[in-house]
Amino acid sequence: TAATQTAFDVVQNEFAGSLFRRINTADSDIQLLIGSKKFTEGWSSWRVSTMGLLNMGKSEGSQIIQLFGRGVRLKGKDFSLKRTNENERPQGVFLEKLETLNIFGISAGYMEEFKKYLKEEGITPPDEMLTVKFNVRPNVPSGKLKTLRLKDGYKDNQKMGFKRQVRELAFFEMPATYQGKSKPIQVELDLYPKIEVLSSKQISTPIDKREKNRLDSSLFEAFDWEAIYLALWHYKWQRSWWNLRLSKEKIKAFAVKNDWYTLFIPKNQLVVRQFADIQKQQEILIELLQLYMSRFYQTLKGLYEGQFYETVLVDQDDPALQNQYTFKVENNDSGKAYRNKLLQLQEILENGTLKEAMGWQMPNITAICFEPHLYYPIMTLKNAETLPLTMKPMDMNENSEIRFVQDLQQANEDGRLRSWIGNKDLYLLRNAANKSKGLGFALAGNFYPDFLLWLLDSATGEQWLSFIDPKGILHMSLDHPKFGLATEIKQLQHKLNLDMTLNAFILSITEWEQLINRLDRSSYSEKNILFMQDKDYLQQMFAKILSDA
């Protein structure tokens, strides 16, 4: 016992509070915790930085994995619960070391097995990696380009942000301040693709042949409303919507209305033969309510934030501009070959020209150097899972994004671009998908378009700013929130009385003939959804942009 110890000072107090409960207090002086296997679960702390395993972890098991879980928790910057990205860390403060969980073991043979497992999953321990970092070359015209930005102080958790200013937001209840300022919220759920996959049906049902049906409200009394409530609570908790309140009674009263959703499902899928069929309808209701919750929250957030956008000039310090790439390269012959080529590119970027950078080549790595882009190069990886390296950030790696830039680059080189835009200057920026850096719109379902494209008339100073998102739209229906940005961005332009013209486009790499929910082409064109299969899709886009001139 503590009373019999003589080798070190001890304190024993039967009436004092628990030392264990003081671990997470700001003034805690506890630096070391020694305990038995009971510490593998049931507690949580952001302070854990090092774990020592003594005769534990000799073999794989749930306890050792649970123990790792005690240490990976991190409060993070601005309560993000995440570790910082490498390119976001301030230099010279060794933040990476502070955020790293260190684990050592004595007679803990599984640790070596765990490292092998990580390698099989493509994760190489940091001490076995070589690092190559290089800065991009900025290409920003001084004092010319304007963009939109949510005013400082109005983002998410900031003092004037939506979460702090619109408190105690009741689910389903539109606050009086915003009533009449948006269309009634309707959600759509098409279960035909899922049913056809499960039934191994080869041919999809045309959209005009799909049945619209309702859930059987007479079954609602048999639903587990506690489970429904918890599913919705977990959904909002995952998204940190802590200013949204839920009530079991109000959820049930709202669900019974049956007029807030459109459900595409064959009628025979709603026939009740056994209890599992009731459970299936309950799961469908949860999915519908989650869709509605997301649309409801993002609509209100968009209405709030839409009042506080401002026009700012883009400069070299703009947070949306990528400034550095970091490569972690395996310390072997293959990795060293890649490292040498990357160092060659680093030298070109520091001392060479754009033309030299355009000539750099490496298998499975492309450095896109497009002169109108606000920095170069844009790095892309092909067959990334087979390469002896990782890259951060993964700036642009979707086929649709790469094709868009390359198509634009080709049109610029062969003169077609000039014929489309006349004497106007074009500038392009790959938008950061990060909330803290990129430009996003809550009004379009928290949408962060992939690219910002400017046309600038130097003679008149007139500007056209377009938000462009190349993507696959195979299963997306026309009422998807992202497809509404083209309309809503125009409303924002007029509401804020901006001195530039705004547009938004979806560029579909999915061919029109392949769409599950296919409508006539004009329906897509009206919402500025263009198909990259069309050879003139870029020409169509620029014609739409300049039709406002």
Image (spheres, rainbow, N blue to C red):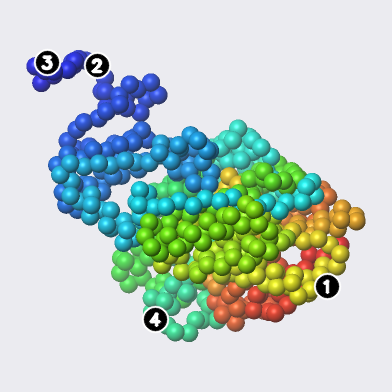
Residue at coordinates 41% horizontally, 76% vertically from top-left?
197
Where disc 4 sits, the SS reads loop
Q: Confirm or deny contact between disc 4 and disc 1 (CB under 8 A).
A: no
84 w.r.t. 140: above or below: above
Where disc 3 sits, the SS reads loop
How packed mark 2 is, by other alpha carbons closer than 10 Å (few <14, some 14-19, many 20 or more), is few
Q: Confirm or deny contact between disc 2 and disc 4 (CB under 8 A).
A: no
Q: CA distance from mark 4 to mark 1?
A: 49 Å
Which numbered disc, 2 or 4, marks the residue that appears first in the sequence? Answer: 2
Residue pointed to by mark 1: 419
Does the image show residue 438? no
Q: Confirm or deny contact between disc 3 and disc 4 (CB under 8 A).
A: no
Which numbered disc, 2 or 1, marks the residue that appears first in the sequence? Answer: 2
Which numbered disc, 3 or 1, marks the residue that appears first in the sequence? Answer: 3
Mark number for residue 200?
Answer: 4
387 w.r.t. 2: above or below: below
Residue pointed to by mark 2: 16
Q: Amino acid at mark 3?
A: Thr
Give residue 377's position: percent from left, percent from top: 62, 59
Mark number for residue 6?
Answer: 3
Q: Amino acid at mark 1?
A: Ser
Residue at coordinates 31% horizontally, 61% vertically from top-left?
120
Give residue 293's position: percent from left, percent from top: 52, 52
Q: Quadrant of the C terminus?
A: bottom right
Q: CA distance from mark 3 to mark 4?
A: 73 Å
Where disc 2 sits, the SS reads loop
Q: Amino acid at mark 2?
A: Ala
